[in-house]
């Protein structure tokens, strides 16, 4: 039987700061997760998105070090309209998150923007152009 992807995990420096970012994108993460070493959110279809602090990872992999040289994972959030994608980008940048690439009309037919989460992971914001 083939394996299925069950969980996508992100390693974070500051749990509360990371979860605040994803709450701005609409994930209903409970406030008590801010102080936890591990948090999970079930996405539609059953796939889970998880966050672990660096200390949690080092508890079972003491030699773990932060990656360097660019993001290693990108998450993409779909919006219904270009205006919604643009507004999400503007809101996140106004809140102090790093805008990596301002909204543009991509040649593949989507309105697209990229913002970095607090740990430098690329978060794509997109919608269909039509």
Image: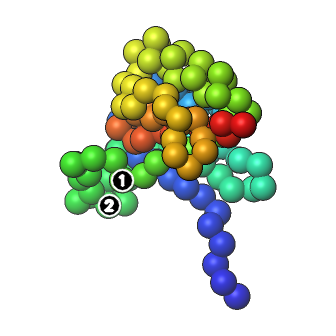
* Residue 110: quadrant of the picture: top right
Q: Is 73 drawn above or below residue 115 in the view shown?
A: below
Q: Is residue 3 left or right of residue 104?
A: right
Judged from the image, the secondary structure of the residue bearing numbered disc 2 is: loop
The coloring applied to the image is rainbow
Q: Residue at x 59, y 18 (%)?
A: 87
Q: Nearer the viewer, mark 2 or mark 1?
A: 1
- In percent of width and height, residue 89 lies at 52, 23
Q: Is residue 46 left or right of residue 87?
A: right
Please give the residue where the numbered disc 1 appears in the rendered image: 72
* Disc marking residue 123: none
> How far apart in space, not on screen, are marks 2 and 1 (Cα)?
19 Å
Q: Which residue is nearer to you in this view: 88 or 68?
A: 88
Q: Residue at x 66, y 72 (%)?
A: 4
Residue, far top: 94
Query: How many numbered markers are drawn?
Result: 2
* Residue 41: quadrant of the picture: top right
Q: Which residue is nearer to you in this view: 114 or 33?
A: 114
Q: Which badge, 2 or 1, comes first in the chain's sequence?
A: 2
Residue, far right: 45
Q: Which residue is nearer to you in this view: 13 or 81?
A: 81
- In percent of width and height, residue 26 lies at 67, 28
Q: Residue at x 32, y 61 (%)?
A: 61
Q: Residue at x 43, y 26 (%)?
A: 102
Residue, far bottom: 1
Please give the residue where the numbered disc 2 appears in the rendered image: 61
- In percent of width and height, residue 50 lies at 56, 47
Judged from the image, the secondary structure of the residue bearing numbered disc 1 is: loop
Residue 53 seen in this snapshot: no
């Amino acid at each position: 039987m083939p394996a299925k992807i069950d969980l996508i995990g992100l390693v974070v420096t500051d749990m509360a700061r990371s979860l605040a970012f994803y709450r701005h994108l609409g994930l209903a993460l409970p406030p008590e997760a801010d102080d936890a070493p591990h948090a999970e959110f079930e996405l539609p279809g059953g796939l889970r998105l998880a966050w672990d602090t660096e200390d949690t990872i080092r508890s079972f992999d003491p030699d773990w070090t932060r990656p360097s040289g660019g993001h290693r994972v990108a998450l993409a959030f779909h919006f219904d309209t270009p205006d919604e994608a643009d507004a999400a980008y503007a809101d996140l940048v106004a809140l102090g998150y790093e805008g990596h690439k301002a909204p543009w009309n991509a040649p593949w037919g989507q309105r697209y923007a990229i913002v970095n989460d607090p740990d430098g992971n690329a978060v794509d914001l997109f919608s269909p152009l039509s």
